Each structure stands twice: as C-alpha cells, then as structure tokens.
Amino acid sequence: MSKLKNKVVVITGGNSGIGLGIAQEFKNEGAKGVIVGRNQETLDLAVAKLGEQFIGINADVTNIADLEKVFAATSEKFGKIDAIVANAGAGTVGTVENLGEAEYDMAMNLNLKSVYFTVNKALPYMNNGSSIILIGSNAAHRAYPSFGLYGAAKAAVIFFAKAFSNDLLSRAIRVNVITPGTTDTPAFEKFVPIEQIEATKTHFAAQMPIGRIGQPSDIGKTAVFLASDDSSFMLGAELIVDGGMTYLA
Ligand code: NDP
C-alpha cells in the first residue's frame, strides 16, 4: 500500500544525493511535489528520473525571497503542502584558526539560517497535522577534524526539531530530524579528488560498524516513515541513520 498517496512534499536539495534519494522514496510511496536546487541541469535530470509527479524549482535556500516563491508556487500548483524536507546543505572544512567571517556566514546561512526560513516560509501553506523533516549530520555529535562550524550548525538544526515541534503543538505539525552518517552522494566530489573517490568510500566503509557507507535510499526510507502516519506519535525526535558510526565506531 502507498503510505504517502497524493501527499505533496517539498524537498530542498532534491536534485542530488540524499535529497534525490528522499524524493525517489516519496515517489515510490505515491507522493508528488517539488524539488528545489540551484543547478538547472541536475534539477532537469532529477525531474526526468522522478517523472511527472515532481517539478523542479530553481531557487537558493539562503535567499528568503526565493523561499517565499517556492512555497507560493507549490501551493498554487498542488493546492496544499503536506510535508517538507529541509535537506539542502554542505560541509565547510577548516579550523577556528583559519576560517573567517565569510566562511562562518556561508556555513551558517546554508546549514542553519536556510533551515529556519525554509520552515518559516512554508508554514503559512502547510496543513495542520503535516510533517516537517530536517536533515542533520553525525558531525553534530562528534568533533571530526575541521568540521567544527558545520557540526555546530547541524547541532542547532537538531535542536530546532524540538523547538519547532513545541512551537507548532496547536497545529499538530510534527518536526523531526534525521541524522545521516557518511552517505554515498556527489558531496564526496567536493572534498576528494575524483580519482580517489572509490578508494575513499572503501576506506570509510571499512570503518563503519555495519561495514558499508549509507545510501540515499537509507535516508529516504526514514524520511517516508517520518512523513507518514506510522510516526504519528513522534515529534521533536532525532533518528540517527548512520550504520553505527556516531556512537559505536
Ligand atoms: P549533495 O552535494 O549531493 O547535495 C546537496 C544538495 O543541496 C544539492 O541538491 C544542492 O543543489 C543543494 N543546495 C546546496 N546549496 C544550496 C542552496 N544555496 N540553495 C538551494 N539548494 C542548495 O549533498 P548530500 O546529498 O550529501 O547532502 C544533503 C544533506 O545531507 C546536507 O544537508 C548534508 O549536510 C547532509 N549530510 C550528508 C552526509 C553525507 O555523508 N553525504 C552526512 C551527513 C549529513 P544545487 O547544487 O543545485 O544548489
């Protein structure tokens, strides 16, 4: 049975990696909606993969006016919004000695401010009883070298799930957060030279308690659960989906 039949979802960063994996799992469960990103080519490719139930909107999640347009356009096209996934984000690498104001603002704008305003601008269009899913990171729980700024932003995202759920009790809107561990996405290409990517993935897999790195579908299936009635008793919760790497490695 389709768990999300005719539900309308907006997924930021739905044109790549984890966001695209989430969109595919939502589609498999009968949902439709919008994926958001800035790269038109990957947006078009993702929409071609997802089929006609999904449209792509080119928008920058760090731009509040863009976010307003995304939710107004979604509501106009689909008539309602049942779920949003605030997934767009990226690591900022460096230490407190070498990252300055520009990098600080970039990390916080993309990984924290965008999450706040994605939710803030979606809420006027969301039904009571709907579901908001935030994407955190295992870097919020452990001080991995050079991931301090990113980890701090993601730790605040995890807190937002609790605070927003509390704020939205009267509307029965549940806000939960998924904390992925290392997951196989194009983000690798940003940190590792292309010829070393496969070796790096093998190296990470060997360090994972479960013996493999995550796939976008691992996160996608968890997001489906959080958007569906199966999780109707969960709010302000964090689901760590990490192959055991955060606390068992
Ligand atoms: P990818 O680089 O594959 O995807 C990132 C997505 O975010 C892209 O779709 C990108 O679209 C979008 N995005 C980035 N900046 C903006 C922006 N300013 N406006 C709109 N969209 C934007 O990364 P992942 O799939 O790996 O990461 C997805 C989420 O998962 C992130 O929040 C990340 O922090 C988190 N995460 C990832 C882990 C991993 O190991 N992969 C582990 C833990 C957490 P476009 O380029 O078109 O703008």
Image (cartoon, rainbow, N blue to C red):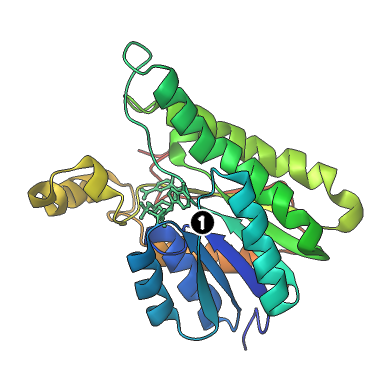
Q: Percent from the top left, x then y, of residue 214?
A: 36, 57
Q: Residue furthest top?
A: 97
Residue 94: x and y in percent read 32, 23
- The residue shown at (78%, 47%) is 165
Q: Position of residue 90 (x, y in %)?
A: 40, 42
Left or right: 7 in relation to 38: right
Residue ID at (60%, 79%) = 31
Q: Which of these two is toward me, 32 or 65?
A: 65
Q: Is 173 on the left-hand or right-hand side of 64?
A: right
**Residue tagged 1:** 59
Quarter of the image with the N terminus in it: bottom right
Report the side of 130 relative to 185 (left or right): right
Front-most of residues 32 and 242: 32
User: What count of labels does the image hold?
Assistant: 1
Image point 37% across, 28% down: which residue? 147
Secondary structure beneath label 1:
loop
User: Seen in the image, is 62 located left or right of residue 93?
Assistant: right
Q: Amino acid at mark 1?
A: Ala
Q: Is residue 78 visible?
A: yes
Residue 228 appearing in the image: no
Residue 238 to residue 112: above or below? below
Which quadrant, please, contains the C terminus? top left
Q: Residues within 10 Å of mark 1 (few under 14, many from 20)?
A: many
Q: Is residue 83 above or below residue 177?
A: below
Q: Report the residue at 82% width, 43% height from top.
A: 166
Is disc 1's CB within 8 Å of ligand 1? yes
